[in-house]
C-alpha cells in the first residue's frame, strides 16, 4: 500500500504517462539505480550495491519485455540489453565498478536516443 504523497504522485505519473514517457522513465530509473550501485561498490557498501544493481537489472528486463519484435531494431536492442545485464551481474559478483560504468554509459546514450526519437515523433504528428 502506498502511503507517502510522493509515492502516490509517482504512481499516478506512471499510470498516466505516454509510452515514450514511460520508456524514458524506465531509463531514468535504471540510470539512477546503476549510479547508486556504482556508489555502493566504491564505498564498499555491498548491500547497497547489490540492491541497486538488481533493481537496474529488473528495469532492463522490463525493457526487454517491452520490445516489439515486428521492428528489426528490437533484435539489436535485445542483444544490447542482454549485454548490459551480463555486465551488471559481473559488476555485482566481482564488486567492480568498470562493468557498471559501461552499462551507465550505454543507458545514458540510449535514453538520449529515445528522447530525440520521441521529439521527432511528436514533431511528425503536428
Image: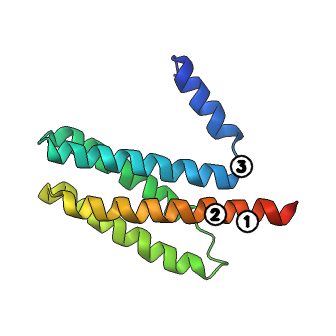
* Mark seen at residue 65: none
Residue 93: % across, % down: 16, 57
Quadrant of res 6: top right
| Cβ atoms under marks 3 and 2 closer than 8 Å | no
Q: CA distance from mark 1 to mark 2?
A: 6 Å
Q: Where is residue 82? Give x, y as percent.
A: 38, 70
Q: Which of disc 2 and disc 3 is earlier in sequence?
A: 3
Q: If you read the primary sequence from the N terminus, does the residue marked by circle 1 or circle 3 appear first?
A: 3
Rendered position, 105 above or below 16: below
Residue plotted at (54% across, 61% down):
112
Q: Which residue is mark 1?
A: 120
- The quarter holding residue 66 reads bottom right
Of the residues tagged 3 and 2, which is closer to the observer?
Answer: 2
One can see residue 79 in this view: yes
Q: Residues within 10 Å of mark 3 (few under 14, many from 20)?
A: few
- Residue carrying label 3: 18
Mark 1 surroundings: few (<14), some (14-19) or many (≥20) residues within 10 A? few
Residue at the far right in the pictured view: 126
- Residue 74: x, y in percent? 57, 75
Measure the C-alpha gap from mark 1 to mark 3. 15 Å
The residue shown at (20%, 55%) is 92
Cβ atoms under marks 1 and 2 closer than 8 Å: yes
Residue 73, by quadrant, is: bottom right
Quadrant position of the C terminus in the picture:
bottom right
Q: Which residue, given by chain and number where applicable, does mark 2 sit on?
A: 116
> With 125 as the anchor, is 57 left or right in this view?
left
Amino acid at each position: 500500500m502506498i502511503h507517502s504523497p510522493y509515492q502516490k504522485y509517482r504512481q499516478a505519473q506512471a499510470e498516466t504517462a505516454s509510452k515514450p514517457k514511460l520508456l524514458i522513465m524506465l531509463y531514468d530509473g535504471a540510470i539512477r539505480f546503476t549510479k547508486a550501485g556504482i556508489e555502493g561498490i566504491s564505498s564498499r557498501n555491498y548491500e547497497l550495491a547489490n540492491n541497486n544493481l538488481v533493481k537496474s537489472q529488473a528495469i532492463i528486463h522490463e525493457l526487454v519485455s517491452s520490445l516489439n519484435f515486428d521492428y528489426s531494431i528490437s533484435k539489436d536492442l535485445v542483444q544490447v540489453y542482454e549485454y548490459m545485464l551480463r555486465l551488471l551481474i559481473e559488476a555485482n559478483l566481482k564488486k567492480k565498478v568498470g562493468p557498471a560504468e559501461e552499462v551507465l554509459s550505454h543507458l545514458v546514450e540510449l535514453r538520449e536516443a529515445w528522447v530525440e526519437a520521441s521529439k521527432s515523433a511528436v514533431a511528425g504528428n503536428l
